[in-house]
Image: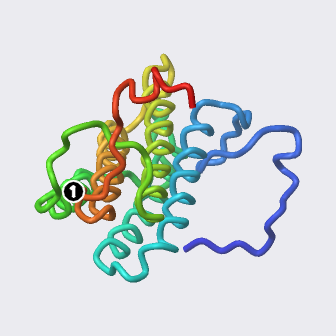
């Protein structure tokens, strides 16, 4: 159980922050950037949910994802040091990836096939889901860079989860655009000859 009595602690005033087990890192550290961008992704999901209250299945899945994103952040904030942990760290699991895959399959069943790349837009929910997609892709790039670091260990399920998550946001955005029928499509070179 988390209990926060005081919000400011002054411990980060010199530009460092504590990981879950207490070790401190500079605030621009790649691991901090990774879980910070996961947190940013979660915030964009909160904004989408302003537009999905009338879409209960989608809204429930997004609420589920928000909780999983906290798990993902906790996983990243608790690096495997190779030493026995003081407590069992929270890790993202294969079941959480499978949940996303099933959610993608459910939404994708009736969506119109793609005939072009899709521009971010359409309904407010769809446009916001595209923002979720791009922020989660940024989180993925940072996580993959972190995992490539010589002294860093990243749970491989974290990478699978964040990769699948952006796929979910893409499919959900198309689902919100009348099952893809009102997607905003890219027209290659459309404005190259236009003087307007």
Q: Is 124 positioned to the left or the right of 18 in the image?
A: left
Residue at left 33%, top 64%?
176
Q: Is 144 positioned to the left or the right of 168 in the image?
A: right
The answer to which image quadrant residue 114 occupies is top left
Measured as percent of width and height from the top left, residue 124 is found at 48, 64
User: Can you name the residue that lies furthest to the front here?
Assistant: 195
User: Can you name the residue that lies furthest to the left here?
Assistant: 109
Label count reads 1
Q: Coloured how?
A: rainbow
Near-viewer residue (156 or 178):
178
Measured as percent of width and height from the top left, residue 86 is found at 51, 51
Is the residue marked by circle 1 packed among few (<14), some (14-19), or many (20+) residues within 10 Å? some
Q: Secondary structure at mark 1?
A: helix
Measured as percent of width and height from the top left, residue 100 is found at 25, 57
The answer to which image quadrant residue 122 occupies is bottom left
Q: Which residue is mark 1?
A: 104
Work out whether 106 lies above or below 29: below
Residue at left 20%, top 54%?
101
Near-viewer residue (30 or 6):
30
Q: Quadrant where the N terminus lies?
A: bottom right
Q: Is 129 positioned to the left or the right of 25 in the image?
A: left
Near-viewer residue (113 or 168):
113
Residue at left 43%, top 20%?
148
Measured as percent of width and height from the top left, residue 196 is found at 57, 32
Work out whether 144 lies above or below 72: above
Residue at left 27%, top 53%?
171
């Amino acid at each position: 159980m988390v209990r926060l009595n005081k919000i400011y602690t002054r411990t980060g005033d010199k530009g460092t922050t504590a990981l879950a087990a207490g070790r401190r890192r500079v605030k621009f550290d790649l691991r901090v950037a990774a879980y910070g961008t996961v947190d940013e992704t979660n915030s964009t999901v909160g904004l989408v949910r302003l537009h999905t209250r009338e879409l209960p299945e989608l809204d429930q899945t997004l609420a589920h994802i928000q909780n999983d994103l906290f798990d993902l952040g906790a996983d990243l904030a608790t690096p495997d040091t190779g030493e026995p942990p003081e407590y069992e760290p929270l890790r993202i699991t294969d079941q959480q990836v499978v949940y996303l895959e099933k959610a993608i399959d459910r939404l994708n069943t009736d969506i119109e096939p793609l005939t072009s790349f899709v521009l971010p837009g359409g309904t407010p929910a769809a446009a916001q889901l595209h923002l979720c997609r791009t922020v989660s892709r940024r989180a993925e790039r940072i996580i993959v860079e972190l995992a490539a670091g010589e002294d860093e260990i990243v749970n491989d399920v974290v990478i699978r989860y964040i990769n699948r998550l952006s796929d979910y946001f893409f499919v959900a955005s198309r689902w919100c655009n009348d099952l893809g029928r009102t997607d905003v499509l890219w027209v290659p070179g459309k404005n190259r000859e236009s003087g307007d």
